[in-house]
Each structure stands twice: as structure tokens, then as C-alpha cells.
Image: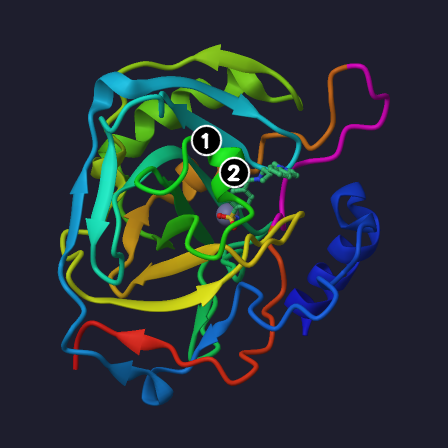
Amino acid sequence: FKMQEAAEHNMKMHPMWQGPLTVPGGDHQSPIDIVVRKSVFDSELKPLVIDYDPKTCQQIWNNGYSFLVEYDDTTDKSTLKGGPLQDTYRLCQFHFHWGESNAWGSEHTVDRRLFPAELHLVHWNSDKYSLFEEAVMEENGLAVIGVFLKVGKRHEGLQKLVDALPAIRHKSSVVEFNRFDAACLLPTNTDDYWTYHGSLTTPPLTESVSWIVMKQHIEVSHDQLAVFRSLLFTSAEEEVQKSMVNNFRVQQSLCGRTVRSSFT
Ligand SMILES: C[C@@H](CNC(=O)c1ccc(S(N)(=O)=O)cc1)Cn1ccc2ccccc21
Ligand SMILES: [Zn+2]
């Protein structure tokens, strides 16, 4: 109930959400609750081919909603293909969603189970489009890998990123961030995932995303997650500082969509 309260509060308070709460006629919205027993095994689904080059990592910044690690996506250096995808998709950024407590924070849920946070690795279809901004508007434009975070042992690979966060506490702050291998944030098993067609979970909420949600989560420590919560939604000039927490969207209805699984 508390989580719902937080989400509703979030809805009302955050400026991001003063836009249309649902895309008019949007029936392929994200996130969703993945009902495991209703997902359909699809033997045609191939293993994911994830090939990230740490040299394409450029900067980390606070956009007032989450923090993003951005990659140089002017060439096919860091790519995702295979799985449910027909084309090659380029990594452009990754970011997270998290709660004010470890009890909630993820956007997708599995049989209603909430996780304290969720990682999104955002890619766009570079076979069909020449810019991310173009791909955002197209049905087959984007592919986002979702990875659930659980609180447990410290994640060594994440620490480099956590150490950079104090430098971007406020909205719009940017720092250079090089040689980060996003692949270190993936679970050991990337063959087991659910996939469905959905949308961006923040405005413009366009229904252009092939979602690939990993079955296996990664573990981060309580202290690492606490540093996420030390970030602020607000810029340095604003007098009232608001801590960046509960930056997730509530689950949307499936509207008859089928969630496929790559595993039985
Ligand atoms: C996409 C927006 C920027 N938003 C994103 O890039 C984005 C990426 C991933 C997610 S998530 N949480 O689903 O993984 C959410 C948002 C820019 N933008 C705003 C209007 C707009 C119009 C055309 C092109 C770009 C435009
Ligand atoms: Zn996201």
C-alpha cells in the first residue's frame, strides 16, 4: 500500500508527470507486471549478442529524473543484437530507477514482486535509423534491456559509477566518465529473459521499445544503493532540495499483449 502511496505522490508531485498520464490510446505502455505463468515460451528466440566497447563511454550526468551514463553512439561500437531483435541496435545510455526504501523501486515486477531498483540499457536501431531521436518515434526503433537489482553483496563493477555520483548530485550536472564497461552490470546468465513490446516509461512515452527483461538479477550493497538516494531531483539554484527517489512509473495494463520467454 505504501508503495502505491509513494507512486501516487510521485505522480502528483514530480513536474515530469504533469504531462498526459497516459498516451492517448496508448495500449502498449510500460512498465508491466510480468505474470510468469502467463508468459509464452518461444523457441525461436535467440540468445542475446551483447558487444559493448568500454572506450565508447563518455559522460555521466543527472538529468533531473535519474542519472545517465552516455555512450558515443556515432558508430556501431557498442551493440545489441539477437534475442527477439531483427536488426542491430546501438547502446546510447544506461540509467536506473529506484525507491526511497529497499522495499520497492523497480519499474517492472515479476508476479507482482518488486525489486529495490532496475537498470535500463537503452539501444536504438542503427540498421533502420541514423539518429536516436528518429528511432524514438518508430515501433521498431528502440530496445531496452532491464536488469533487476537486489540488495546483497557489494557490486565491484558498480563502485566506479557510485564513486562518481557525488559529483553529479544536482540536476544538470555532468562529469566526464570513461572506460566503463556496461557489460559488467549484466547478470551472468543473459540467455533467460522475458520480452514484450512496450514504451518509454517517461515522457514522451512513445511505444517504440522492444523490452528485454532479464530473469536473473544482479546484487548491489545497501550502501551502494544509498548513494543513488543521495542524488537530487533539483538543481543547485533551487532553494528546496528534493532527494532523487521513487523515480519509477507505476505498472501499466497489458492490454492483451503476450510476454514471451526465452526459457521454459
Ligand atoms: C526521448 C526523450 C529522452 N528520453 C529517453 O531517451 C528515454 C530513454 C529510455 C527510457 S526507459 N525508462 O523507458 O528506459 C525513458 C526515456 C527525448 N525526447 C523528448 C521528446 C522527444 C521527441 C522526439 C525525440 C526525442 C524526444
Ligand atoms: Zn528507464
Could you say where residue 182 lies in the image, as x and y percent from the top left?
27, 33
Does the beta carbon at disc 2 come under 8 Å from ligand 1? yes
Q: Name the residue that disc number 1 marks.
A: 131
Amino acid found under the numbered disc labelled 1: Leu
Q: Quadrant of the N terminus?
A: bottom right
Could you say where residue 130 lies in the image, as x and y percent from the top left?
41, 31
Crowd around label 2: few <14 · some 14–19 · many ≥20 (10 Å): few
Could you say where residue 242 lies in the image, as x and y percent from the top left?
74, 34
Which residue is the extreme one toward the right? 239
Q: Name the residue that disc number 2 marks.
A: 134
The magenta-colored residue range is 237-247
Rounded to the nearest angstrom, the CA distance separating label 2 from label 1 is 5 Å
**89 or 134, nearer to the observer:** 134
**228 or 24, nearer to the observer:** 24
Residue at image point 44% right, 61% down: 115
Secondary structure under tag 1 reads: loop
Whether residue 123 is in magenta: the answer is no
Amino acid found under the numbered disc labelled 2: Glu
